[in-house]
Each structure stands twice: as structure tokens, then as C-alpha cells.
């Protein structure tokens, strides 16, 4: 595939923040991909502000114009050659993702197929939806997110319609405690064949010594372990994400050992960092990994993370904040086990795209 032109322009996110969009032109058509606005962190790839990102793009644009690439892997190797740092600090991880994902769309368009079809190596299956029904920003709970998801899934569209129906019937008082909200959700699970998921986001309440809750309660690491075990025992909770702070691989492994039938998931624990994930695999820290494609770098980097997880029989969850059908195509094309969805306009776009894909493959 030969690139006729590649450009960048400033656009807006769904939150009306300024970002950039990469545009690629080939003789088969034009595609676009938005650069995500990622937060930087000690273990994460480096993202650049929009103005600097645009400047970096103009510096490297010449490497792509009138060049031919055979597939996404060749392109992504080329991106790693341009920026040899481990965290994309030279050109920015967000620009890297925008370029890589734009090329992915261009390759699929070049071949006249959908993105998930370009990526597929086996029979397509739809991921199980993890529906965020509330979070700490909407209520007074200490948990980062509370989720519902189907115990079993045969048809994605039926799962998502049931979840949306249950969500539409929920009414949360801002003064509800953690236990009261869990009781409300627990009452819905049996009749709807659902389970509860909890993202504790424990790094947010860790003060380097204890876990500090809004009630004023401060828990040691062992007390936090006991709390999570009690919740899993007393409520139909099957999914537990980030129950401890981002560096506690050992206690996460302990919880996984004590709750072998639950899905213990690392998100901040791994921070989309391949080396941290390999460390977690060695320690058997989790039975699941939450992967955010926009925070890894290239599409090939995402594929390698998923491949490593599947190699060790670790469940894969995909989540992403971009308002784009790309995430749905990645979820199916790379064979993710679960997809985390909110109940908002961006997630509705992803839900509908997954329903369209399902209708095509059934």
C-alpha cells in the first residue's frame, strides 16, 4: 500500500478538548484517526500535548509520504525505528497510536474489508460487555466503578439490551453507602443472570501506608485484603479490578489464590506496560488484564500484549476513551474476552458497532 499523502489537523474530543487527527490518503480512499489525550504516569508511555504533537508530526511526515508499506507490522516496526525510546517520549505515544491506527484503517480499506476482518486469525467472537452502572464521580461510593455483566453470553446484542434495560431502571441516591449500592445491584443479578464487577481503583485511596476511605476508615494492606474477600463472599461479585495499589503484585497474587473462581484484574497494576505485565505473569498476580489500546503505542504492541495474555490463559479486557468504532473492531479482531463500556454516547457508538459486526458474522 502506497501513501499519497498524510496530514494532521486539530479537532475536538467528545469533552470539547483540543486534540489532533491524523489523515491518510491512498488511491483507495481517505481515513482518519484521533490522537488520544492520555495522562502521563511513571509506568506509562509518554503522551504529548496537542501543539507539541503537531510539531513532531510535521518533523516526521516526510518518512511516510509516497512510501509503500506491506502490512501493519511493517509500519509499526518503522514507528519504533523512528522513536527508539521505550516510552515513545520522542514523538509521543498518543501520536504513535494515531498514526498506527490510521494505517490500520488504511490497510483494511485498501483490501476492501472491515478492520476486524483484517486483524482476524480465527472465527470471530463477540466480547462479553462489562457495563459501568455507576462510579465514584456520580455517587458517594469509594469504589472507582461498579459494573454489571452477563453470567453467560450467547448473543452480544441480547446481553447489551438486557444490561441497558437494567441500567435504565436504576436510581442511585448520592448518599448511598458502598454496602447499600451493592445490595441494590445484588438484588438484580439473579433474575437477570448477571454478576457484579468492582473496580476498586485502590491506588487512588492509597497514601503509601494505608487505604483511606471516605468514611474515615484507614485499612492496612491485610485489612484491605480482608475487605475485598468479604465483599466477594457476601455479594455476587465475579470481577475485581485493581483491589490494591499499583505496585502490590504480591497481595494481588494472594487474592487471586484465595478467590480462584473470581476474575482478579490488573489495570493500574500493569499500566499497559509489557514488562510489568510479564512480571505479573511470573508472580501469578492476576487472572485478567485490562488493556487500553490508546495507552500502549502501536497496534502491534496491543496485539503482542493480547497474545502474551492468551498464552498464559489470562482473560483480556479492552477499554478505551476514544469516540470511535475502532475499539469495537479491535475487540473482535484481536479476540478480547471482555469489553468495558459506559452508558454514554461514546459507548453507545461502540455498542452499535459491535451489534453491526455480530449481525454480519452470525
Image (spheres, rainbow, N blue to C red):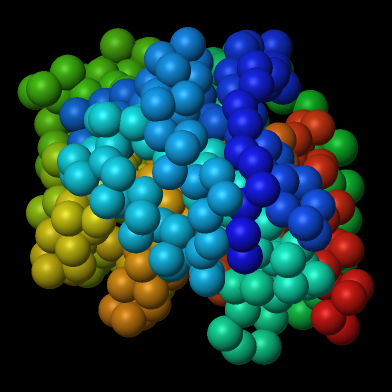
Given residues 105 and 82, the one toward you in this image is 82
**For residue 26, above or below residue 39:** below
What residue is drawn where x is 41% and y is 57%? 76
Given residues 255 and 93, the one toward you in this image is 93
Given residues 113 and 64, the one toward you in this image is 64
In the drawing, does residue 123 fall left or right of residue 262? right
Quadrant of the image occupied by residue 20: top right
**For residue 324, above or below residue 11:** below
Q: Position of residue 190 (x, y in %)?
A: 71, 63
Residue 329 appears anywhere in the view = yes
Q: Where is residue 173 in the image (x, y as percent from the top left)?
A: 70, 18
In the drawing, does residue 336 fall left or right of residue 116? left
The quadrant in which the N terminus is found is bottom right
**For residue 206, above or below residue 276:** above
What residue is drawn where x is 73% and y is 66%? 110
What residue is drawn where x is 54% and y is 61%? 68
Q: Position of residue 219 (x, y in %)?
A: 19, 28
What residue is drawn where x is 80% and y is 59%? 28
The quadrant in which the C terminus is found is bottom right
Given residues 205 and 184, the one toward you in this image is 205
Q: Where is residue 3 in the image (x, y as percent from the top left)?
A: 62, 52
Amino acid at each position: 500500500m502506497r501513501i499519497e499523502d498524510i496530514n494532521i489537523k486539530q479537532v475536538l474530543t467528545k469533552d470539547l478538548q483540543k486534540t489532533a487527527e491524523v489523515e491518510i490518503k491512498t488511491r483507495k480512499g481517505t481515513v482518519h484517526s484521533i490522537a488520544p489525550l492520555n495522562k502521563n504516569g511513571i509506568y506509562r508511555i509518554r503522551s504529548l500535548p496537542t501543539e507539541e504533537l503537531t510539531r513532531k508530526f510535521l518533523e516526521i511526515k516526510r518518512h511516510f509520504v509516497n512510501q509503500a508499506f506491506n502490512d501493519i507490522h511493517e509500519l509499526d516496526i518503522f514507528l519504533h525505528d523512528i522513536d527508539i525510546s521505550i516510552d515513545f517520549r520522542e514523538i509521543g505515544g498518543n501520536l504513535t497510536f494515531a498514526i498506527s491506527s490510521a494505517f490500520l484503517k488504511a490497510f483494511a480499506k485498501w483490501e476492501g474489508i472491515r478492520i476486524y476482518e483484517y486483524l482476524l486469525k480465527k472465527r470471530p467472537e463477540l466480547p462479553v460487555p462489562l457495563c459501568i452502572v455507576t462510579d465514584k464521580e456520580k455517587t458517594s461510593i469509594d469504589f472507582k466503578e461498579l459494573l454489571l455483566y452477563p453470567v453467560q453470553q450467547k448473543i452480544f446484542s441480547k446481553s447489551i439490551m438486557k444490561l441497558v434495560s437494567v441500567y435504565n431502571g436504576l436510581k442511585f441516591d448520592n448518599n448511598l453507602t458502598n454496602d447499600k449500592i451493592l445490595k441494590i445491584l445484588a438484588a438484580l443479578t439473579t433474575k437477570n443472570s448477571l454478576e457484579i464487577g468492582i473496580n476498586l481503583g485502590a491506588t487512588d485511596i492509597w497514601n503509601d501506608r494505608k487505604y483511606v476511605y471516605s468514611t474515615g476508615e484507614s485499612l492496612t494492606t491485610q485489612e484491605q485484603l480482608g475487605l475485598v474477600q468479604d465483599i466477594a463472599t457476601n455479594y455476587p461479585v465475579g470481577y475485581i479490578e485493581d483491589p490494591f495499589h499499583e505496585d502490590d503484585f504480591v497481595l494481588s497474587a494472594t487474592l487471586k489464590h484465595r478467590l480462584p473462581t473470581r476474575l482478579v484484574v490488573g489495570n493500574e497494576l500493569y499500566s499497559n506496560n509489557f514488562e510489568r505485565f510479564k512480571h505479573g505473569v511470573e508472580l501469578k498476580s492476576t487472572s485478567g488484564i485490562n488493556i487500553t489500546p490508546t495507552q500502549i503505542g502501536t497496534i502491534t504492541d496491543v496485539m503482542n500484549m493480547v497474545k502474551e495474555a492468551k498464552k498464559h490463559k489470562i482473560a483480556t479486557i479492552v477499554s478505551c476513551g476514544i469516540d470511535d468504532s475502532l475499539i469495537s473492531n479491535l475487540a473482535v479482531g484481536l479476540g478480547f474476552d471482555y469489553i468495558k463500556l459506559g452508558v454514554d454516547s461514546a459507548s453507545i457508538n461502540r455498542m452499535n458497532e459491535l451489534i453491526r459486526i455480530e449481525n454480519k458474522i452470525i
